Amino acid sequence: SQQGEEDPQALSIQEGENATMNCSYKTSINNLQWYRQNSGRGLVHLILIRSNEREKHSGRLRVTLDTSKKSSSLLITASRAADTASYFCATDPIYNQGGKLIFGQGTELSVKP
Amino acid sequence: EAGVVQSPRYKIIEKKQPVAFWCNPISGHNTLYWYRQNLGQGPELLIRYENEEAVDDSQLPKDRFSAERLKGVDSTLKIQPAELGDSAVYLCASSLGRTIYNEQFFGPGTRLTVL
């Protein structure tokens, strides 16, 4: 079963614009992670935010976490054509005592040059 | 440092045939995962190993799927017999261990098509 639900399912923007993707989940978590998947490739880890953190930055990426609303957002600033990919949130539920990630369905981002 | 290696990258078989996928995790990573990813979906865990022990195989369809991780390094996932609904990408991932900071490193996957 997939815990995360991502919104929107697809997003198309122009190069230079910002892209925001949202993720909602159901159960309490240890951490939430974002992954990117280019077409035909495996997933690449982008960023991890712990349950006691509210915001985290990595380069052009900004992730927020609201545990009271069980939601997270990923912001990509100044997007580039190379950012075109599918983005997945994954939660590490507390009940798993670490070790099992549950992925959402993903947001397909298209950045047009 | 080499990443997670999987082979083959692509496999096309007829239904009812057997198929096997191989994974070599990142050196030193004790935990190994097999996921299945259907088209347009996120990955779903099939089985998780800690060293050579399968610690979570609740999502593995045991009537036709089997996996092994001999010596706690490489792993093989087998389907016998394959069904049409098994067409998917099979991803292998590894991580340093079972902690609450569980960053997983994924291989490129094996795309299986069952005809």
Image (spheres, coloured by chain):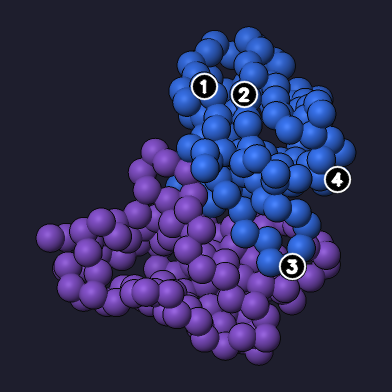
Q: Which mark is residue B21?
A: 2
Q: Is residue B85 visible?
A: no
C-alpha distance separating marks 2 and 1: 7 Å
Q: Secondary structure at mark 1?
A: loop
Q: Which mark is residue B55?
A: 4
Identify the residue under disc 3.
B100
Q: Are marks 2 and 1 in contact (CB under 8 Å)?
A: yes
Q: Secondary structure at mark 3?
A: loop
Comparing labels 4 and 3, the label whose residue is closer to the camera: 3
Q: Is residue A91 visible?
A: yes
Please say if A58 is above or below A89: below
Residue under mark 3: which chain is it in?
Answer: B
What color was chain A assigned in the picture?
purple
Whichever of labels 4 and 3 marks the residue nearer the N terminus, that label is 4
Residue under mark 2: which chain is it in?
Answer: B
Could you classify mark 3 by the number of other residues whose Cα lies within 10 Å: few (under 14), some (14-19), or many (20 or more)? some
C-alpha distance separating marks 2 and 3: 28 Å
Residue A53 location (% of width, % of height): 61, 86
Which chain is the one coloured blue?
B
C-alpha distance separating marks 1 and 3: 32 Å
What amino acid is found at the position of numbered circle 1 in the picture?
A: Pro
Whichever of labels 2 and 4 marks the residue nearer the N terminus, that label is 2
Whichever of labels 4 and 1 marks the residue nearer the N terminus, that label is 1
Whichever of labels 2 and 3 marks the residue nearer the N terminus, that label is 2
What amino acid is found at the position of numbered circle 2 in the picture?
A: Phe
Q: Are marks 2 and 4 in contact (CB under 8 Å)?
A: no
Residue under mark 4: which chain is it in?
Answer: B
What amino acid is found at the position of numbered circle 3 in the picture?
A: Ile
Residue under mark 1: which chain is it in?
Answer: B
Kindly indicate the quadrant of the structure image that contains residue B81.
top right
Please say if B108 is above or below A26: above
Identify the residue under disc 1.
B8
